[in-house]
Image (cartoon, rainbow, N blue to C red):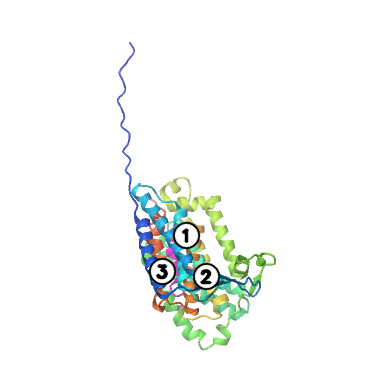
Amino acid sequence: MTNTTAPASVEAPTVVRVRRPKLAITLGVLTVLLAALFILAAREGWTTFRLSGADALIPLGEVSIPTAPFVWGTLALLVALTAWAVADTLAYRRSPLWLSIAYGILALFGFLTWAGADGLVPVISLLSGALSISVPIVFGALGGVIGERVGVVNVAIEGQLLFGAFSAALLSSITGNPFVGLLGAMIGGVLVSLVLAVFAIVYVVDQIIVGVVLNVLIAGLTSFLFGILLVPNELELNRPATFDRLPIPGLVEIPLLGPVLFNQSFLVYFMYFAVAAVAWGLYRTRWGLRVRAVGEHPQAADTVGIRVNPMRFLNVLLAGAIAGAGGAYFTLVSVPQFNEEMTNGMGFIALAAVIFGQWHPIKATLAALLFGFASNLQNTLSVIGSPVPGEFMLMLPYLVTIFVVAGAVGRSRGPAAVGQPYIKG
């Protein structure tokens, strides 16, 4: 006899919809602040905003922008984008990435127009300076991405940058060769990473504590060596040979971006290569697959024959070499000698760029460029006599970082096993 009993009904799983209001709240707060600034400027009277594209290689002339129409039009667009983010939140939708990017660009140009009114803003100098400030942050962020992708929190980026700067200055001064200084900076970063790897991976010490202690140790060590070694022998040991600018024929003639991107030193071109190589390697090679596997699920990686701790150890050293190269920029390009604590907290900004960039090398690079632009914008507006108080201008780069990390990027999830030691059992 055929069994005709109907199968029991299976209930569909309940889908929990969660609102994510952080982006809408952040954009709302920023819109209100910008509106207050623009209204204040309207009471004092509008002026003309002028942009200069002049450069030593390519003079592009001057462009004048009527401040009032541009500012009010920008504010209207910002209000519209904020309303869009609020509507997405109420409808339980995730706002598209382009919305945050468009808001950031519009808010930036609106603020720049207001703060730089009645002044002449040199666009190429502004962008070139932003790139220059960003270079060590980009190298540090790349080191942070590799370290955390493989499962080790690299809080010691600041120490790697600082020791790289010291090693580069010392070796370049002794040999008179900036490439030897660059190699020394990478070795210096590896030495700092070696201590991090030994304590965090071999002795299973808390990775964040090791990183913080290393930063303090390197700051004290370089200050001590600076006082007893470099100061008494400044001409011999603290006058490094530096990298000169190498304009690329043809590319440097591209309007606006050419002088910014292709009239740089060897280290900047090396940064371009490093970003492309790390991005390609992490997502297109067997090495990258193993790195991501070890950082996400070390037990599963171990079962398929990947040696988890040696993999972590070697890649932490690689991350240190890349971060150390960023330290070389301070003494071989930016400032032609070593000074105490000259990294000025950029290693921690690089760590923030890793989180902002969601542990992706390209996104982390864009985050580093954003901080560099905010830092150089502060310098530019101070020079042209902006009405913004100087204290606020000093806070601007860090305020931008806080706003972006807190709200603009939404919820970031790092590798599942980051910060967790692996003990094979």
Judged by its main secondary structure, the magenta piece is: helix
Residues at marks 2 and 3 touching, judged by CB atoms closer than 8 Å? no
Tell me the kind of residue under disc 1.
Val
* Front tag of 2 and 3: 3
What residue is at 46 percent from the left and 50 percent from the top?
293
Q: Earlier in the sequence, mark 1 or mark 3?
A: 3
Question: Callout 2: helix, strand or loop?
Answer: helix
Residue for badge 3: 38
Q: Residue furthest top?
A: 1
Residue for badge 2: 130
Q: Nearer the viewer, residue 261 or 88?
A: 88
Q: Earlier in the sequence, mark 2 or mark 3?
A: 3
As displayed, is residue 11 above or below residue 406? Answer: above
Tell me the quarter of the image containing the N terminus. Answer: top left
Q: Residue furthest right?
A: 249
Mark 2 closeness class: few <14, some 14–19, many ≥20 residues within 10 Å:
many
What residue is at 46 percent from the left and 74 percent from the top?
378
What residue is at 35 percent from the left and 47 percent from the top?
92
Asked where in the image residue 325 lies, by quadrant, the reply is bottom right
Q: Is residue 313 visible?
A: no
Indicate which disc residue 164 carries.
Answer: none
Q: CA distance from mark 2 to mark 3?
A: 25 Å
Task: Point out the stretch of residues depicted in magenta.
Answer: 341-355
Residue for badge 1: 145
Q: CA distance from mark 2 to mark 1?
A: 22 Å
